[in-house]
Image (cartoon, rainbow, N blue to C red):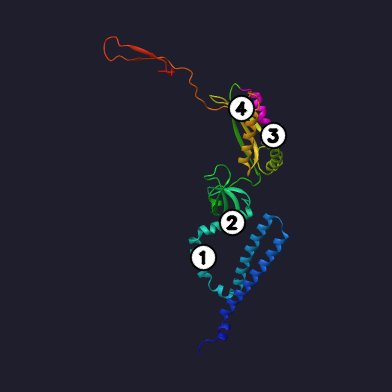
Amino acid sequence: MGTTFKDWLLDPVIQRVLMVVVGSVVVIVAFRLFAAYLSTRVHDTDTRYRTRKIISALQYLTVVFVTAVVFKDQLGGLTVAFGVAGAGIAFALQEVIVSIAGWAAVSFGSYYRVGDRIELGGVVGDVIDIGMLRTTLMECGGWVRGDLYNGRIVRVANSYVFKDPVVNYSADFAFLWDELEIPVTLDSDLAHARTIIDETLEQTVGDYAAGAENAWKLMVTKYRIEDARVRPLVTMGFNENWAVFTARYIVDFQRRRITKDLLSTEILDRFRASEGRVSIAFGTLAITDFPRLTVDTGNSGSNPSKTPIDPLDTRS
């Protein structure tokens, strides 16, 4: 006689499989309800994101635990087989294993978090998701000048945490130093030019510097690092043609290009309004004189005629 449905249900292996399926469904539903409840209670975006990630990881671990408990009798006799298979799997999936280790390092090692701007695996961008295998970045730069998005979403393996340097633009100190070079003619009032640049820096980025001073004090207490200047600084140098002022200032890592545009526009407007006291320098080529040339117009003979020509005379 064929096996009936009742006999099939009484099979111990089938019963254990059903227990795993039912237990997994109960675990998944319970964790998702719990995640939905917390989403209504947690208002901070970063905390809510991290909570969802932790709940998702605990959900999978619980399912694995339930499976191991149900099949614990069978697992004991397969220890050797699992050991051999595990070694082969570890070798074949070593990149995956390293990526999972990288995820653990990122999650508990403060390498970066969602919202940080980083450089990982040669890609610069803002972190928009941290998965178990890959970190997802909204890429900056590329064919786009400055620290602006180019529209590409890049997924970088977490294993690069152990292979390459991890550059974080906003971890403990969410500010960057930037510089703007302003060329000024040597016949300008250089002292007045410095005053204009100083005042423009203070008006445009002074608030950034005030906030950055407190952040830098925390950096000094946390790391072995010098107490660097965060207030705007103007220095002057020379090249073979003109004077060059360098404006060094602190700026938010997300507003570097916009701030440079504001500074450039304001400084240029104030130079033009200085009634000729300060002028922006630019490369020009001025022809002031040519030597007089003598052209031999004779074809033969011992005394050929020679006609002087003025190169600047447009009538010839």
User: Where is residue 226 shown, x and y percent of the image?
Assistant: 66, 37
Q: At label 4, which amino acid type do we have?
A: Met
Q: What's under tag 1, amino acid-wise?
A: Gly
| Total tally of numbered discs in the picture | 4
Vertically, is 66 above or below 279? below
Check disc 1: other Cα within 10 Å, few if <14, some if 14-19, many if 20+: few
Q: For the residue carrying disc 3, how many other residues have a C-alpha within 10 Å: few (<14), some (14-19), or many (20+)?
A: some
Q: CA distance from mark 3 to mark 4?
A: 17 Å
Q: CA distance from mark 1 to mark 2?
A: 21 Å
Residue 124: percent from left, percent from top: 56, 47
Q: Label 4 vs label 1: CA separation?
A: 65 Å
| Location of residue 163 in the rendering, given as x and y in whole percent from the top left corner | 53, 50
Looking at the image, is mark 4 or mark 1 earlier in the sequence? 1
| Callout 3 amino acid | Glu
Pointer 1: what residue? 86
Residue 195 highlighted magenta (yes or no) = yes
Disc 3 versus disc 4: nearer the observer: 3
| Amino acid bearing label 2 | Trp
| Residues tagged 2 and 4 counted as in contact (Cβ below 8 A) | no
Secondary structure at numbered mark 1: helix
Give the CA distance from mark 2 to mark 3: 42 Å
Q: Is residue 17 above or below residue 50?
A: below
